[in-house]
Image: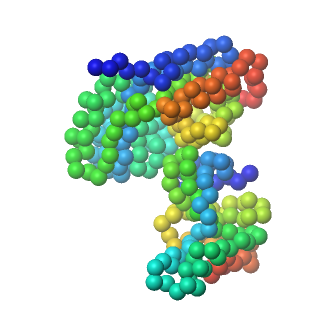
Amino acid sequence: MLILTCPNCGQTGEETEFHAGGEAHLKRFGPGSSDGDFEEYLFMRENPKGVHFERWRHVYGCGKWFHAARCTTTLEVFGTYSAQVTEPPKEICDKISKKRPDWSWRAFS
Amino acid sequence: MSNAVSALNGVTWAQGIATVTEVPLQGMITLRGQLTDAKVKKAAMSATSLEMPGHGQANCVDDRGICWMSPDELLVLCPYDAVSTNLKQMQGVLGDVHSLCVNVSDARAVFDLSGDNAREVLAKLVPVDLAPDQFTVGMFRRTRMAQVPAAFWLHDNDSFRIICFRSQAQYVFDLLTVASQRGSAVDVF
Ligand SMILES: [Zn+2]
């Protein structure tokens, strides 16, 4: 079971109280961007076995969005953090490094 | 003036291991705004004569109360016929503070679930740790109840108050009565 703690309201609940919002930290390429960038933004997603960063919404709770760093194989949650950031905060990366020393995900490690 | 009735007209069901009662006509006001703002706090407190609850808490006495819904939302409970007076007063207190204050009394239904087994009846329906040392008086929780959103708090020892959407009142009533059928005690707490 995936157990998440919402950083907005502080409540801890299991997966069904939340709604998954797809991969985190995507940079939008809209009108005027190159076809390559647009395709990358629209279709190309990470599908890691291990450390992953996702967007979640506390849909049955406070209703707010947040980010979660978790392992896709063990469902271990390394941490949840604000939706208002464009990359994982240092303390989350440090927590992951402690448990998975050689992790990497997109440009982060 | 029309005759206001609640969703299930105050129905009571007491044939099981817990008693389910619809609380008729509870006044409810949604107040959205920055909860750290003094005027937002004052608006909620002036309508209820109660103190602000902490993060994730509810401060309820009889049919008055302040419930913490999210970092920018409170649910203010008051007698049904005091809603419009309270709304005007709250809007006066709020002035030009960026906020929203609206009567949601008829958009919701409220249930009371009581009896020795109330805690375990509710535990069958929500993904929340309801162990007596984990969920205590004063706490307020928004979650799902089977397939619909719900919020609840311990009004008293062994008496929960549950709020759901009015359109889902019958569904929630059915859930509660099925979960409290005679002979269905789990005796887990
Ligand atoms: Zn939340």
The single residue placed furthest to the top in the displayed view is B15
Q: Residue at x 55, y 80 (%)?
A: A38
Q: Position of residue A16 (x, y in %)?
A: 65, 48
> x, y (%) of residue A18?
61, 51
User: Is residue B43 at least partly visible in the picture?
Assistant: yes
Q: Where is residue A42, by image quadrant?
A: bottom right
At 66% from the left and 73% from the top, the residue drawn is A45
Left or right, residue B142 beside residue B120: left
Q: Position of residue A5 (x, y in %)?
A: 60, 53
Q: Residue at x 75, y 22 (%)?
A: B184
Above or below, comparing residue A100 to residue B28 in the picture: below
B52 or A51: nearer the eye?
A51
Please state the horizontal and vertical placement of residue A49, each as a whole percent of the image: 77, 70
Q: Which of B55 and B80 lies nearest the eye of the viewer?
A: B80
| Left or right of B97 in this view: B117 | right
Question: Would residue B87 be found to the left or right of residue B169 on screen?
Answer: left
| Identity of the residue drawn at 57% across and 77% down | A41
Rendered view: B85 above or below A14: above
Left or right: B23 with respect to A44? left
Q: Quadrant of residue B75?
A: top left
- Image quadrant occupied by the C terminus of chain B: top right
